[in-house]
Image: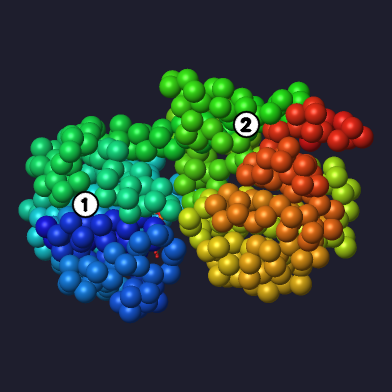
Amino acid sequence: MLVTVYGAGYVGLVQAAVLADAGHRVVCADVDASKIEQLKLGYVSIYEPGLTELVAVNAEAGRLTFTANIQRAVEHGALHFIAVGTPQLDDGSADVSYVLSVATTIAQHVEHDAILVVKSTVPVGTCDQVAARVHEVLASRDRTDLKCPVAFNPEFLKEGAAIADCQRPDRIVIGTEDADVEQRLRELYAPFNRNREKLMVMDRRSAELTKYAANCMLATKISFINEIANLADILGADVEQVRRGIGADPRIGYQFIYPGLGYGGSCFPKDVRALIRIAQDAAFDPMILRAVDARNTRQRTSLVGKIKARFGADLSGRKFALWGLAFKPNTDDMREAPARAIMEELWAAGARVSAFDPKAMDECRRIYGTRPDLELCSSPIHALDGADALVVATEWKAFQGVPLETLRDRLANRVIFDGRNIFDPQIAAANGLEVIGMGRARREVVAEDRPVRAEA
Ligand code: NAD
C-alpha cells in the first residue's frame, strides 16, 4: 500500500521503517530539513537498536524514501500517518497544533481519496477536531467530493525495543466507525496480525482515551512502588523483598514495579499531566493521577536528599560520579530524565559531576554544552576518578559488571547512591562499600550512627 508518514521522530521513523519492511511503499516526511538530509544519507540521529539497519535495508530496496517537501509527501499516500509531536504546554495540556497543521496541509494538497491516521498521542476529541479541519479546508477548495476520513491508531512502542514492539504488537487499537477505513487498516496491518487477532476496533474517543489510560496505568504502578519504597526506607524494610512478595501475585505481576527515581522520557510525564488537564477541563478531579504525578516529581530528586543527608546541604568542593543520563537503558533519550534533575540539583548545591552513559553522551553535550561543573567521561570507571561518591541514575546492564573492588578503590568516600537498586547493599558492605538505595534501609544495614530518616 502507499503510505506517507509525517514526523521522522521515534514513532514516525520506526513506523515508516517497519511498514516499509512489510512491503508497503512508504514516504517519511518531516519539516526538519536537516534531519531528512541526514536520513537520505543513511544517518539516523536517534539511538534505537536495529533502526539504522532497518532504515538502510528498506531505503536501498526503494520501499522507504524521505522528503522535506510536504506537498510531494501528500501526493504519495493513500494512507497518511500523522506521527508528529504533541508536547506539553505550560498548563499541562498537550499541544495538538502540529497534528492540526499536518492535517491542514494534507487537506490543502490532496487530490485523491485518502485516509488520515493519527498516531500521535492526542486528547480525547482531537480526531473530531482534525476531521472538522479537513472538511473545512476541502470545502474552501470546493473539493468535498474527496473522501478523507480520520482514524486514530495509537502507538504503544517502548523506546529501546521500538522495532520489536511495532513488528510484534500486543494489540493494534483502531479508532474508527467507518467500515472502509477498518478494512484498509486491516489490509495494512495484515503482516502483523497473523498469529492471532490483534486488531481492536473501537470508536475514536475510546481509542484516544485508551492510549492515555495505558500510559497512566503504567505510571501509576511506578509511582505506587516508589511510594512503598519511601515508606520502606522509613520503616526499615527492604522494598526489593516487598516487590518480589507482591509481584508473585499474577493480578499484580512483576512488570513495572521496580522502585527507583521515577518515570521520565517523552511520554509518561506529559501524558499523565495531559490526562489530568483533560479531566479538569471536564470538571472532574483526577485524584489518583495528581498523586501519581506529584510522587514522580518528588521521586526524581529524592536521591539528592539522601546525598545531602550524608554530605551536608552545601556540596561545594565535592564531585559525584553519575552513571546513566538517558531516562532508561537502551535509549539516548534524555527528555525528562531523572539524571537531569539530579545533576541540576547537585550543581545548584555547588557540586561537580563526572558522568557516563553508554549512548546519551552526545545528547547530554547537546543539552548542557560545555560547563566547568560537568565532565563527560569515556567510561564508567573513568567517571569514578576523584569522585566522593557514585550516583546511579539509569540501570544500564553494563554498570553491573564493574567490579566492586574498582568502586571501593576509586571512590573517596566509598558510598554509592543507587537510584535503581542495581547493587546489593549487603554484598557491597562485605566489599567495604556503603550503598544507599531506594527503599532498602533494612535495619541491619543502616549504619548505627545514622538513624533512619523520614522522607524530606
Ligand atoms: P519526536 O519529537 O521524536 O518526533 C516528532 C517529529 O515530528 C519531529 O522530527 C518533528 O520535526 C516532526 N514534525 C513536527 N511538525 C511537523 C509537520 N508539520 N510535518 C512533518 N513533521 C513534523 O516525537 P515522538 O517521540 O516520535 O512522538 C510523536 C508522538 O507519538 C507524540 O504524540 C508522542 O506522545 C507519541 N508517542 C511517542 C512514543 C515514544 O516512545 N516516543 C510512544 C508512543 C507514542
Relative horizontal placement of residue 430, taking residue 201 as reference (left or right): right
Quarter of the image where one finds residue 389? bottom right
Residue drawn at (75%, 32%), measured in percent from left and top? 441
Left or right for 288, reference 322: left
| One can see residue 170 in this view | yes
Between 99 and 237, the one nearer to me in the picture: 237
Is residue 13 depicted above or below 237 in this figure? below
Image coords of residue 355 (percent x, y): 67, 63
In this rendering, the answer to whether 381 lies above or below 257 is below
What is the residue that sits farthest to the right in this orientation? Answer: 449
- Total tally of numbered discs in the picture: 2
Q: Residue at x 78, y 61 (%)?
A: 410
Q: Which amino acid type corresponds to the residue marked 2 in the rendered image? A: Glu
Q: Residue at x 73, y 58 (%)?
A: 406
Q: Provide residue 338's location: percent of width, then percent of height.
A: 62, 50
Q: How is the image coloured?
A: rainbow
The residue nearer to you, when weighing 207 against 107, is 207
Mark 2 to mark 1: distance in Å? 46 Å
Residue type, numbered disc 1 = Leu
Residue at 47% across / 34% down in the picture? Answer: 255
Residue 146 image-quadrant placement: bottom left
Q: Earlier in the sequence, mark 2 or mark 1?
A: 1
Q: Are there few (<14), some (14-19), or many (20+) residues within 10 Å of tag 1?
A: many
Secondary structure beneath dot 1 equals strand
Instruction: Please give the label number shown on residue 116.
Output: 1
Q: Is residue 385 above or below residue 40?
A: above
Which of the two residues, 450 or 213, is positioned nearer the viewer here? 450
Instruction: Classify residue 221 as left or right of residue 339.
Output: left
Left or right, 194 with reference to 213: left
What residue would you read off at disc 2? 240
The quarter of the image that holds ligand 1 is bottom left
